[in-house]
Image (cartoon, coloured by chain):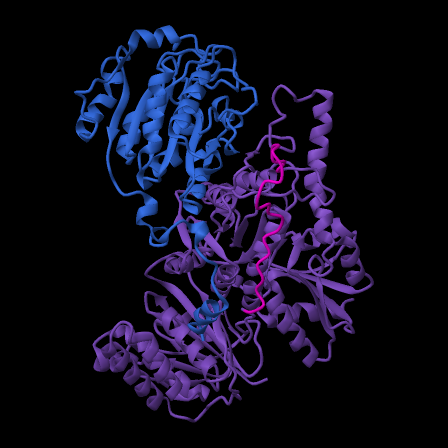
Chain colours: A blue, B purple
Amino acid sequence: MATSYASDIKPIWCPGCGDYGVHAALNKALIDLGIDKSKIMIVGGIGCSSAMPHTFSTYAIHGIHGRVLPIAMGVKLANDELTVIGVGGDGDGYGIGGNHFVHTARRNLDITYIVMDNQIYGLTTGQASPTTLIGTKTKSTPFGDIEEPINPISVAISAGATYVARGFSGDPMHLAELIKNGILHKGFAVIDALSPCVTFNALNTYDWFRQRVYKLDASYKAEDKANALQKAIETETTNWQKIPLGLIYKENRPTYNELDITLKQGSLIKQPLPTKDQVRSLLDGYA
Amino acid sequence: MSEVVIRVAGANGDGIESSGMLLLKIAARSGRYVFGYRSYQSVIKGGHVWYQIRIADEKLYSHGSDIDILVALNQDAITYQLKHVKEGGIVIYDPSRTTISGAPQGTKLIGIPLLDIATKVSGDPIMRNTVALGAVLRLAGIDIAVADELINETFSKKSQQIADQNIKAAAEGYNFAGVERTFNIKNDSRRRYVLDGNTALSVGAYAAGCKFYAAYPMTPASGILHWFASHENLGVVFKQTEDEITAINATIGAASAGVRAMCGTSGGGFSLMVEGLGLAGMIEVPIVVVEAERTGPSTGLPTKTEQADLLFVNHAAQGEFPRIVVAPRSAEESFKIASEAFNLAEMYQCPVIILSDLYMAEHIEGVEEIDADGVKVERGRVQAEATNDGRFDRYKITDDGISPRSIPGTPGLEFVAASDEHNEYGDLISDVFAGIDEYVEKRKRMHEKRMRKIDTMLKNEDLFKPELEGGQADYFFVTFGSATMPAKEAVKLLSNEGLRFGIISFSYLLPIDAEKTLKILNGKKLIDVEYNFTGQLAQHIKSATGINIEKRILKYDGEAFTPKEIAEQAKLIANGW
């Protein structure tokens, strides 16, 4: 079993960046699970957090902005035996990649998607993101943001994701558990990881989160969808005074690969190429 | 050559498409060459559509020019199509539904109560197609027994009763038509496949081991989507995606994971795929992308043809990277090119774009030879296992520009495929290293490595140059892709008039072997024939060879070239030379 899945590559993140905590949490989850590193594919988009694939020594694709989930889907459909993990930021996943987020959720592909949510565009030096709170002044909203932020938890549940959780990079051990269980979950697992940007987001700081986050206790029923949606919108109903952490929704539903007529037969990459006879008999149908 | 051109005209929803396909199959199975083309509109019911079926005793490359037999299923068909009927041609119509006036002298009008017969035989008005089909078979001199056989094969899947009713309907039409004017087209006993371009391409890809196809519905590429969707039980995965961005990126994901993968669309969808195309170029993932052009710009004419995306696909995406662009010149060639495309993509680890168009995608061709046995699968430089304990240098700098690739799941060969500029291990050099002398040099060497693959491709002696036919001719058409087909037939028409035309046609367009291409074109009287306003092939040739083809026959009205119109324009050009 590997003692670490981290590579020797130094992350590009600022000192104190929330993404370090997420990196540690993912590394711990992988160590706990002990998956052969050659059987792991980590797909990133573009942005600070999307550079995370380089910091692991597994197979990885550092793709293009917003397209984490389409690439991850292609990998998972081609080789079901790989553990596929998507990583990226809130701009990547909920902004430019928003369409893919919704559709990947309803497909219930067996992919774990970790979104490092810092409520700002960091690598482009501080513009508003889809999760920036109303009133926040950023380089692109100098008079304060006037758009309602996306609620990734309620969107994910509504769209059909079957494991929806929120973690906090300030509590990497808790986050690691959420990621580990997300990987173990058969289906699309979304983990919104609150990951403060210490350089461009002066509002949503570690302290700001620590005053507001709380962990769901054992009495919380994650399998009840109506209840989960109610919990998902607690951020809005309390005007961001209470932010629940933990597994908010979980459902057991067949995955895409379990339902697809071809993939039911096994991993696509292991299925044989057509023989000449098969091609000829196919052609005969056109004579 | 003896031939008959039949045009069945009516409205969308009349069932013209399936009876047209049936007629093509009957004619092909009875030992004739066939060619079909469907003209339709972007509406589901109503409107004006026609299906043209050409039957001959020689290989055909066009749906033909003027009509020998018009089957008019409604009044619009007479209004719009009567003028296209040849002198002395035949019109089949239903006197209970349509009236004809103003037919040219000598036109033979055959009134058949199509609707009454259909209703009598089956109660289903759609079967008037089959009644007309029977009449056409009689006039075209085709044995009705073959029709019975094919009707049975086609309809007995639905129910034997429907099959029997159709056989009866065809027989009624056959008997009604009389025999005063028949076409006598020689037949042989050779077997022919009846394939449209999309189907031929799909089967070629399948034969080459394509296991993954992703697409968003878009005319005229949807035929490929339908093929893969309906053949999912053959061990392929078809994924309909939320947009074309997803289609290409999922294809990149699947290809990265090691399966042969393809996506397809038309120009509008390809516009969305452009960023992904660059990703494939940068991380050197072998993908095949089909771009079936239609009339642009923007939504344009969704059901009409054009070749105005050549320069777009040649240059699409920011930055520079090697790519292969190839445009099949027939359905038959579509099979071959699709099966070759995956080898090329994997050998050179780059995107291959198959540039088709509506006419190529949707025309139907009688194909004698499909070389299924000749399909070879060459997966290129794949490293199967780790050879040392060090990190795998996926992007190793090599003389031919091609680096070893590993398939995820292989222990010891892990790497990151990065869209950022990277070193030989895939580590990005765009961050704290960018601009540092050592890394300035690394970027330069990595970019040169990728671009060197173009030189490596051009070592292939056969592919990247045009094909010359009729070397002794006085004039030469210059074409690519689908325009090659009607131009080939125009060559025949011109030769009947004593004009010696040859043809220089491109399937592989990029990269282009400038030296060989120049040698083929040099010193000849050239006429560029293509479906666009600006002569994009001519521009491409000029930029590669310096040869400026001034004489051009360009078409951008959405309709397919007829051999006759090319020949007529060519004659004017030749006479004025």
By secondary structure, the bulk of the magenta-drawn segment is best described as loop
Q: Quadrant of the N terminus of chain A?
A: top left
Where residue B490 appears, as percent x and y from the top left, is: 64, 72
> In the rendered view, would you say B312 is above or below B54?
above
As drawn, the residue found furthest toward the right would be B523
Residue A148 visible? The answer is no
> In the rendered view, would you say B430 is above or below A265?
above
> Residue at 34% across / 84% down in the picture?
B148
Residue A124 visible? The answer is yes
> In the rendered view, would you say B351 is above or below B362?
above
Q: Is residue B445 left or right of residue B343?
A: right
Magenta residue span = B373-394
> Residue at 63% across / 48% down in the picture?
B381
Question: Looking at this view, is B272 or B123 the one in front?
Answer: B272
Question: Looking at this view, is A232 or B67 the one in front?
Answer: A232
Question: Looking at this view, is B257 or B303 the one in front?
Answer: B257
